[in-house]
Image (cartoon, coloured by chain):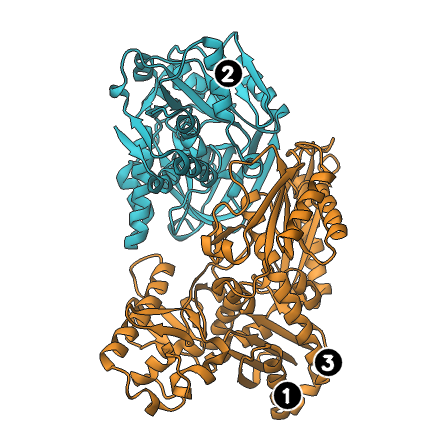
Chain colours: A cyan, B orange
Amino acid sequence: MWHILEDDLESIAIGAGILGTGGGGNPYIGMLRAKQMIKEHGPIKVLSSDELSEDDKVICVGGIGAPTVGIEKLRGKQSYYALKAIEDYTGTKATAIISNEIGGSNSLEPIVPASLLGLPIVDADGMGRAFPEVQMKTYFVYGVPAYPMAVSDEKGNTALFTEAVDSRWVERMARAVTIQMGGVACYALAPMTAHQIKTTAVLDSLSLTKKLGDAVKNARALHEDPIDALLQVHPGRVLFKGKIVDLDRQTTAGFARGQVVLEGMDEYQKDKLTVEFQNENLIARLNSEVVCIVPDLICIVDSERGEPITTELLRYGFRVTVLGFPGPELWKTPEGLATAGPSAFGYDVEYADLELS
Amino acid sequence: MRIGIDVGGTNTDAVLINGDVLVSKIKTPTTRDVTSGIVTCINDLVQAAPECATVDAVMLGTTHFVNALLERTQLAPSAALRICLPATTMLPPLVDWPADLKTAIGGQSYMASGGHEYDGREISAFNEIEIREITKKMNADGVRSVSISGVFSPVDDAHEKAAAEIIRLEAPHMNITLSSEIGKVGILERENAAMLNACLVEVASKTIDAIRSAMVAVGLNVPLFFSQNDGTLMQSEFAAQYPVFTIASGPTNSMRGAAFLSGVPNAVIIDIGGTSTDGGMLINGFPREASVAVDVAGVRTNFRMPDVFSIALGGGSIIKSNPLQIGPESVGFRLSEESVVFGGNQLTSTDIAVANGLVEIGRPDLVKNIDMLFAKQVQKEIQKRVEDVVDQLKVSTHPVPVVLVGGGSVLIKNAFDGASDVLRPPNADVANAIGAAISQVGGQVEKVYSLTEMTRDEALDQAKTEAVSKTADAGADPSSIEIVDIEEVPLTYLPSNALRVKVKAVGTLQ
């Protein structure tokens, strides 16, 4: 067990930005919201999965929508409203809260209801990174039902999905509602048991964000290379160093889709890297050869400060380093790849493990 | 022939530039009213160089406005009005502002119904009565300037404009800044930038009016330009409304001027003025641009800025002992009246430099009585603070060339931690004025293209061509024009697939 203090939020936000692979919402705004909560309600207790007891009821909350919208129409207490709706419907009170995804502001979303209810959060999540769609959670891949699910906006609207054919249908319905709600909303899922968490969640991911963020912060303070520091905490490799020369971005059907083209610098001077994204970075092609593909992680960071850059903040002229990290093992099984592998995003490319050297 | 003027907190400098040649330079103390120093400068310049008669334009850069923010002085009592309800309330306006700056501007904030969704629908209906009530409160609280920020105003600014209209009627003397005219998507950062603008409009309008009448008085009936953060120029009428676009022009001018003078294309440039020290990294003769949100006086903003690190330390910084305190207060332009070496009784960092024998200014005998142990200790601390600035700008532990400019650079010794070389280029004392004089002109295009009629590439090409020709029309040498910024905002609420494109080009004034 550990506690999240106000001072830890910056590290968590940096780490979550890196694991967010471009998506998951603006970590700064998530951090400010969490800060407001901790200021008002005190530090947040974090439990590791083996500290959960058999009767614990863990409710997963998360944000849904386009990050481009999220930096403008800032989220408030929507996840708390959604959680209350699930408690009312199931007649079960939450005893702990867990994140849907560890990337971006979603990693800190549980802090809002946890603060308001005085509950602990669990050091784990349903992705081990960020993914664009609701069904892309290890919980659902390994048997946790995706319903009932509640989606709430800031205006006082809540939609409750009590039955669904599968998690894809939940995604479809939630997305349609989110667009009507103005492009950002929050949701909550049915309570999970300790056993379900231990067998279906990506464990210790919240502490990993803190380690990554601490590494970047320490490297900056010591004037060491933040990229090296990141790679020491979490094994991966540099895919590319370069400058953004083209950016094509559209918000359609609730997603920020597009691609970014980089021209190489230093040892990559003669090369070109293209990264395609749908909220999160999905595929990186060096010249035309695929060098990293989902569910492995493609992270774009500021070359000098190691600051993760989310898709909505990418701009012409930025000098960036693109990092690749292996995705969580739960995603590399046949069922994992079917849900969140290349084919799930419409790519006719066979998944191959990221080459680390 | 062009006159470049730099109004710093301590000195006002002017240069006369003919093409690439520095014809003459003048340095005078900045005056309390700012303008009489400028008049002195121009008059002296005209006397020293009769060629002044053929001046085509005056380019002015000033740190006056950013100093107001750093020192938290001359700021108008300002309020932030956000049009958003019921959205965004968890993070109200000014949420992440330094407490002392918030206090200095009164720190009022209000939230009202309205604002838009990303697709152009209203979040809630705009409510005139609410805005009238808020205006009443602002009047009662003595607010003189307001920033209005609507959620998604870069997509639809109707509610910002509607609120401005009501406030104009109910509070005719209120200065109004609309966030949609300042920044792009990202409510907190755009609202912050608009709020910084709001609290500066009063001091900016006053200063600019005075400068223009002063120019007319000495017979200079030529266009007056202000240098902007990105190194391009804007007309003075525009600068009076949008002072926030000039707040980083000091460092930009100083860096570009230093590049011009030192001939070193890659270095850390440290500009030590009377009140503040600004540092930036020069890459191929241009300031490195910040790639992430930029802090201005401790406030997070999102407009395009050079990556500058500033601290409140300059030649006029006031020194206190027990406990040792260097700045942030500065005697600024009163250095030649109030510092000890000039017969005053305010101990400043310049007095310390004189006591340590780094420079001879004023009457060194007046600082003879300073305890040398104390003087050495202060000197060490000043040096360390500047070395820290260089340290923050570098990206590795490798030493880099450091170019020192600005009047306050006399505070610093050449034995410099972390520098491979310390350069003090000739005429560096007027680097900012030179940077202003060699500023470029820009052209900006902002248009909505329907992608049913053309491809995205065609739309971008069209916008680029238009920006280039606008820049040429503004007086740029066509061969020098380059595109410096491209921004796309998709407007999904239009029936067709539409794209708002913003392109900015710059070139050298012909």
Label 3: how many residues lie within 10 Å, few (<14), some (14-19) or many (20+)?
few
State whether discs 2 and 1 lie on one chain.
Answer: no
User: In the figure, A309 relative to B496: above or below?
Assistant: below
- Which marked residue is nearer to the observer: mark 2 or mark 1? 2
Chain identity of mark 3: B
Q: Is residue B379 visible?
A: yes
Tell me the element at label 3.
helix
The CA span between labels 3 and 2 is 70 Å
Label 2: how many residues lie within 10 Å, few (<14), some (14-19) or many (20+)?
many
Q: Number of numbered discs present?
A: 3
Tell me the element at label 2.
helix
Q: Residue at 38% of width from left, 84% of height from top?
A: B340
User: In the figure, A110 relative to A26: above or below?
Assistant: above
**Is B273 left, or right, of A51 in this rendering?**
right
Q: Position of residue B318 (x, y in %)?
A: 39, 74
**Is B9 left, or right, of B452 in this rendering?**
left
Q: Which residue is mark 2?
A: A85
Going from the N terminus, do you reach mark 3 or mark 1 first?
1
Label 1: how many residues lie within 10 Å, few (<14), some (14-19) or many (20+)?
some
- Which marked residue is nearer to the observer: mark 3 or mark 2? 2
Amino acid type at circle 3 is Val
Q: Which residue is mark 1?
A: B43
Q: Are marks 3 and 1 in contact (CB under 8 Å)?
A: no
The CA span between labels 2 and 1 is 75 Å
Q: Is residue B400 visible?
A: no
Q: Residue at 55% of width from left, 63% of height from top?
A: B247
Q: Position of residue A14 (x, y in %)?
A: 38, 41
Chain identity of mark 2: A
The CA span between labels 3 and 1 is 12 Å
Amino acid type at circle 1 is Asn
**Is A105 left, or right, of A232 in this rendering?**
right
Q: Which residue is mark 3?
A: B216
